[in-house]
Structure formats: structure tokens, C-alpha cells
Image (cartoon, rainbow, N blue to C red):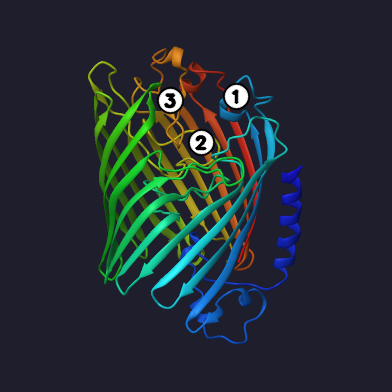
Amino acid sequence: MTKYIIYLATLIASLIAYNSGAQNKISWVRYDDDFTVLRKDSLKKGLDQLKYIPLGKNHFISFGGEWREQVQHYNHLNFGDVPPTYSDATISQLWHRLMIHTDIELGSHFRFFMQLSNTARFFNDNPMVPEIEENQLSLHQAFGELKFNNWNFRLGHQELFYGNHRLITFREGPNTRQAFDGLLVKRKFKNGSLDFFAVSKVISKQYVFDDESMHDGLLGIYGTQFYANRKLGLDYFLVNFQSRDQKYNYQSGYENRQTCGIRLFSNLKIVNFELEGAYQTGKFNDLTIEAYSVLADVNITVLPAKKGIIGLAVSLASGDKDSTDGKLNTYNLLYAKPAYGLVAPIGATNMVSLSPYVKINPVQKLNVLAQVFFMGRNSNQDGTYSPGMVQNRPKPNALFITNKKTLGQLYVLETNYQQTKNVSFALDASYFDIGSYPKATGVGKDILYLSFKSAFRF
């Protein structure tokens, strides 16, 4: 009952807020919002009045938030393979997200940022997945930041993301976003930046202020350098990951893994590309880690007036080759985004993927993406894992029961309509036409996924 009261109160408050006006300069990570144009504005209207409220000489406080509702429908959740505790593999549900934040600036060199989060799931009787679906109330972010001309020092709960979200991300797709606890040091240069971080992923729990951290450790650097008037960019990274909770082929143990890699990308008028590669080494129990991931994405603009783009992406990530050779070849996704969306719990490890796509803006406020993934296992001596690196196929008693590799074809249609600077709507549809591997390792039914999402951000 408490969930429904919170949901109703959120809906009413958001509708009231919607009529208050519009904002801009809103970022996906809200501590990067830029409302400095309002700092000296004494005639602010609507929701602008929540930004840069004076607290004294050169001291300010700002407020902001997000309200998101997402209706989803699955035919044959997880290819129809659900635990006995599930009532049905075909479900409809509502995801609810409310996030409120405040940013306190004390002079030019210090600020404190805090964000509360409330996520919930409705109309689905299956067991809850707390890390993804529901966190009734959490202190999602809370950090202090010391700022100088070219240095930033940030300590506390915070969202992070780098590159194209294939290493570390705040994970926008799932209902509950991802945060980290620890230290970030950023050094800014004329044409780039270098970050040093020592953090631990925050484990999102279902109830009120019960999140945990300091289970896993992540220590590393991530740098970005731009060339040719920012038309070319190079990312480089070196990360150490430590955990006592990892499992590979259902064997648990202590993992100490190093990941190094580069990402080369362009921002040109007609033809663009992205090339990314990473290599991993280290130890998992007594096994020596040797794993890799590579991706190539090339696209061309064919309709400049409509931002029409056609492209092709190819990715390859290693899986374990031989359970008896003393090595572990499974690529660890660390804290990457779900590479294939929300339709199926499949992460981009032990995977070969070929993906043509089309992007277009048929009208000014509408973005459309149509994409097809042709997917298969890289190694038949390793299973498939979720984006959170939890193995889900095959079952423990059937690890090497099949040599089949083909996962199938995933057809994706995503749309986003930005009605105003604050209000957006998204309609997504996906169909997973399964191949021989899901059929050989379970019920193996095709998946249909439909989603309608509305969001209000201020």
C-alpha cells in the first residue's frame, strides 16, 4: 500500500510541476547540469526559480528532479525460462522512478550535491529484482566537491560514466540507476581530461536507506584527448577490479582483474567511426585471466537534413576456451551498459555480434533508431551472462551439454519524442528470434518486448 501512496503523490506533484514552466541545460548525470545563465537573473519565472537561490554572498542552492513512468510488456520473459517461483513468463508491468536533487555551491571552490531516489514496480506478481527494479528510498548520490581551475576532487556517493558506457556507466535503462562510492580526481587539459578514481559499486537494496557498498573495488584512470579541432578523439584507460563475489561457470572465488584499452572515435560531417579494444589479465582463484573485447562501428550520413545515418557495428568478446587449461578467458563487463537493451538478460561477453542500423530524425523533435543484432556465442565452452555478469545459460548441471552457438536475431525499434525541453516520450519495440543455443539450453521461446516511457525532468 505504501508504494501506491508514494506513486500517487509523485504523479500529482509532477503534474503540478509540469505546469510551472520549462528548463534547459539538463544533463544525464544531474551534477553536470548547467544553469549558470540564471545565476544573476533576478526575474526568474516558473521552475527557474528553483535554480541559484541565494544563501548569502556567492553562496547558492539549486533544486531539480526527474519523474519517469515506463509501461512494459514481455512475451516469454528470458526465452520462457523462469524460476519456479515466477507465476508467469508473459507479464505486463509499470516501472516508476522519482529522483530529487539539490546542489549547494559555497563560493567558487566548493559544492555539495545530494540526490534521493525512489523506484518501484507495479502490476507484476513475480519476485522483485531489487538491484534493477525497486528501491523504495535511497540516498542515491551525496558528495562534496573541491574545485580549482584545472582540478576537481570529489568524495562520496556519485554516478560515473566514461566513453560509450562500455566500461562504467550510471545505467539509465534499468529502473534503478547505478552509483559508486569513493574518490574521483579529475585533471582538465586544454584538449582533454584525465580521471583517477578509487570507488566501490553501490549495491541497491529494495527498502528504505538500506543500500550497501565496499563489496567490490575499482581503481583506475580514464583519459580523453581530442585532436584536429575536436573532430577526432582518443580515450585510454587502465582499471583494476577486485571482488570476492564473482562466479564463472558457477565456480565462485576471488577475482583480481586488470583491464586496459583504448577507444578511437570521430566527429566528422559525413563518415564517422568508433574503434574500441580492451584486454584483461589477472587472477581468478588459481586461474590466470586472459580475456579481450573489440568493437568497430562505422556509419555514414545519407540524409543530412534529417540526420539520416546508416551504420554497421561488429563486436567480439571472449569466453572461456577450456575448463582444464588453467586459464579464464571470460571477459568481465565490469559496470557496462546493457549492450542489447532490456529485452533479454544477455550481456556482451562470450559474444559475437554483427549489427546494421539506421538512425533518422523524420521531424525535428523525433529520433528513430532501427537496428538488428545477429548474435552468437564466441566459445561453446562458456555460457552466457547477464549485463551484471551473472551466468544464466546453461544451467549448472548442463554446462557443456551443447556445442550450439547461435543465439538468434534481435530486432530493435527505438523512438524518442522530445516534446519540450523538460518532457519526453519514448516508444520501443523489440523481437528476439531465437536460434539453436537458447533452444538447446531451456524452453527456448521467442521474446516480444514493448515499452512506452514518459519522462519529466527539471
Give the residue type at disc 2: Leu
Q: Residues within 10 Å of mark 2 (few under 14, many from 20)?
A: many
The quarter of the displayed image where residue 388 is located: top left
Considering the numbered disc 1 on the image, is that residue within a helix, a strand or a loop? helix
The nearer-to-camera label among 2 and 1 is: 1
- The reply to whether discs 1 and 3 touch (Cβ–Cβ < 8 Å) is no
How much space separates mark 2 and mark 3, taking CA atoms? 12 Å
The nearer-to-camera label among 1 and 3 is: 1
Give the residue type at disc 1: Gly
Residue at coordinates 42% horizontally, 50% vertically from top-left?
181
Q: Which residue does the numbered mark 1 point to in the structure image?
A: 80
Q: Which residue does the numbered mark 3 point to in the structure image?
A: 406
- The reply to whether discs 2 and 3 touch (Cβ–Cβ < 8 Å) is no
Residue 249 horizontal/vertical position (percent): 38, 21
Residue at coordinates 32% horizontally, 37% vertically from top-left?
242
- Quadrant of the drawing holding the N terminus: top right
On the picture, is 325 further left or further right than 76? Answer: left
Give the residue type at disc 3: Thr
How much space separates mark 1 and mark 3, taking CA atoms? 17 Å
On the picture, is 440 further left or further right than 151? Answer: right
Q: Which residue does the numbered mark 2 point to in the structure image?
A: 410
Q: Residues within 10 Å of mark 3 (few under 14, many from 20)?
A: some
- Quadrant of the drawing holding the C terminus: bottom right
The quarter of the displayed image where residue 334 is located: top left
User: Considering depth in this image, is 390 or 191 the residue closer to the camera?
Assistant: 390
Looking at marks 1 and 3 on the same chain, the residue that comes earlier in the sequence is marked by 1
